[in-house]
Amino acid sequence: EIVLTQSPATLSLSPGDRATLSCRASQSVGYYLAWYQQKPGQAPRLLFYDSSNRATDIPARFSGSGSGTDFTLTISSLEPEDFAVYYCQQRSNWPPPITFGQGTRLEIK
Amino acid sequence: QVQLVQSGAEVKKPGASVKVSCKASGYTFSSYGIAWVRQAPGQGLEWMAWISAYNGHTSFAQKFQGRVAMTTDTSTSTAYMELRSLRSDDTAVYYCARDPRRSVGPGHFDYWGQGTLVTVSS
């Protein structure tokens, strides 16, 4: 099983700050990594797929990068609505084909 | 617009089964896959299974193999997930999600249902 480790577990920042979230895979997943945002009481929302492909209606302040085992989600200047939990997710040909990271909570400092 | 609307909350006793529905609209149902993901209270996301609405191909997380059944009804654009032999640790919000990979296996999930809370309690 490919394990995704997200860091930090919690990130405390202020609006206007730059946020950098990390997701590390236990073995290479190529470019097959997605990022989701989840707010309390809501379903997850897709931000990026295949590492850097922005999903529909995702603002340009969000960017995704990486390949192999190391991936990054960057929010260039935090807006109040960006404070949420972020999950990475990989797909592979190995069972199980889908795993999620444990999440990074982005909270207001 | 794309929408996935799930059935309402359920309360079940240990050992029972639950069947959750997911009605899709706003896109061609048979051109996509449907994934099922659950989230226990206060916990992260856990992928359970996936079904192609195109050809019926399925994929399961090993821990759910044999306990989860999925079907799709293209006439009503609805997907169903049944979880059997419920235990208290199955208490969670269950989500369906659309997958642009329609036939070869799960990929990523671009639209999600609102979630269905399943509570397992004696």
Image (cartoon, coloured by chain):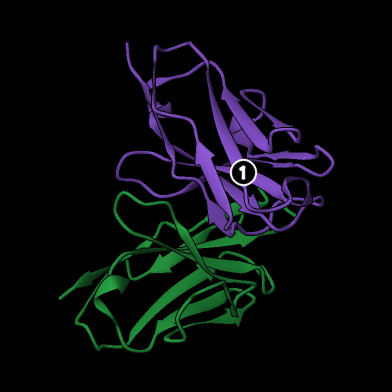
Chain colours: A green, B purple
From this viewpoint, is residue A13 visible? Answer: yes
Please indicate, yes or no, whether residue A95 appears anywhere in the rendered image. no
- Image mark count: 1
Q: Position of residue A38 (x, y in %)?
A: 38, 59
Outermost residue, right side: B55
Tell whether A43 sits left or right of A29: left
Give x and y (percent) for residue B30: 77, 45
Compared to B84, does B43 lie above or below?
Answer: below
Q: Residues within 10 Å of mark 1 (few under 14, many from 20)?
A: many
* Residue type (three-letter) at the residue carrying disc 1: Ala
Task: Identify which residue is drawn at 59% across, 24% down.
Answer: B82
SS for callout 1 = strand
> Which residue does the image show at 68% across and 51% down from the upper left?
A97
At x 28%, y 80%, the residue is A79
Residue B93: x and y in percent read 41, 37
The quarter of the rendered structure image containing the C terminus of chain A is bottom left
Q: Say if B41 sits above or below A23 in the image.
A: above
Considering depth in this image, is B21 or B103 the residue closer to the camera? Answer: B21
Q: Chain of mark 1?
A: B
B29, A40: nearer the viewer: B29
Residue at horizontal 61 percent and vertical 43 percent from the top: B24
The residue carrying mark 1 is B24
- Give the image location of residue A3, x and y in percent: 54, 57
